[in-house]
Image: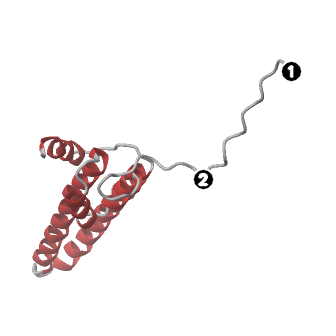
Amino acid sequence: MPDQEPTPPPPPPSAGPELGPKSTSTGLPSNVAAAVACIPLIGGVVFYIVEKHDGFVRFYAMQSIIFGGAWLLFNIASSVVHAVFGAIPGIGGLLVFFWAIIAALIQIAFLVVWIVATIKAFTAVRWDIPYIGPMARKQVETAP
């Protein structure tokens, strides 16, 4: 069959699955950097300072800063309420007990929201934590 052109050789095998777009400031894929930035306060502050170009990572970093601040403020307020309830004679122990249950449920809610945000960031889905996400988006959009 002389009229057929030779077929080109197959492409070389790839080294593995291609990662998502690189984050130019950190060298990490955007989804990994955003997931690490979800660590409340610490991860958010580090990645917000280091990452200058990737809006996805900066959004999750700012959301983490605000979320971590809210979690910290809740812990401080919870300690104050615990101390005040504990100082009430007679029913203080009962109030402290009920407050401990309520505070534990709120802590679990904070933990669940953190886990969901981290999973969403790792799967490269932009997810707004209720009330906090819009604030973070506004901060990131107005930042230089």
Mark number displayed over residue 2: 1
Q: In front: 86, or 71?
A: 71
State left or right for residue 28 relative to residue 129: right
Mark number displayed over residue 141: none
Say which element carries label 1.
loop
Q: Position of residue 63 (x, y in %)?
A: 24, 52
State left or right for residue 64 relative to residue 92: right
Marks 1 and 2, the one that precedes in the sequence: 1
Q: Position of residue 79 (x, y in %)?
A: 16, 74
Q: Position of residue 110 (x, y in %)?
A: 30, 60
- The structure residue drawn at horizontal position 15% and vertical position 46%, both measured from the top left corner, is 139
Say which element carries label 2.
loop
Q: Amino acid at mark 1?
A: Pro
Circle 2 sits on which residue?
Answer: 16
Q: Position of residue 75 (x, y in %)?
A: 19, 69
What is the residue that sits farthest to the right in this orientation?
1
Q: Residues within 10 Å of mark 2 (few under 14, many from 20)?
A: few
Q: Residues within 10 Å of mark 1 (few under 14, many from 20)?
A: few
- The structure residue drawn at horizontal position 32% and vertical position 52%, both measured from the top left corner, is 24
Q: Is residue 96 above or below residue 47?
A: below
Depth-wise, is mark 1 or mark 2 nearer the camera?
1
State left or right for residue 136 relative to residue 35: left
Q: Amino acid at mark 2?
A: Gly
Q: In front: 87, or 110?
A: 110
The color scheme shown is secondary structure
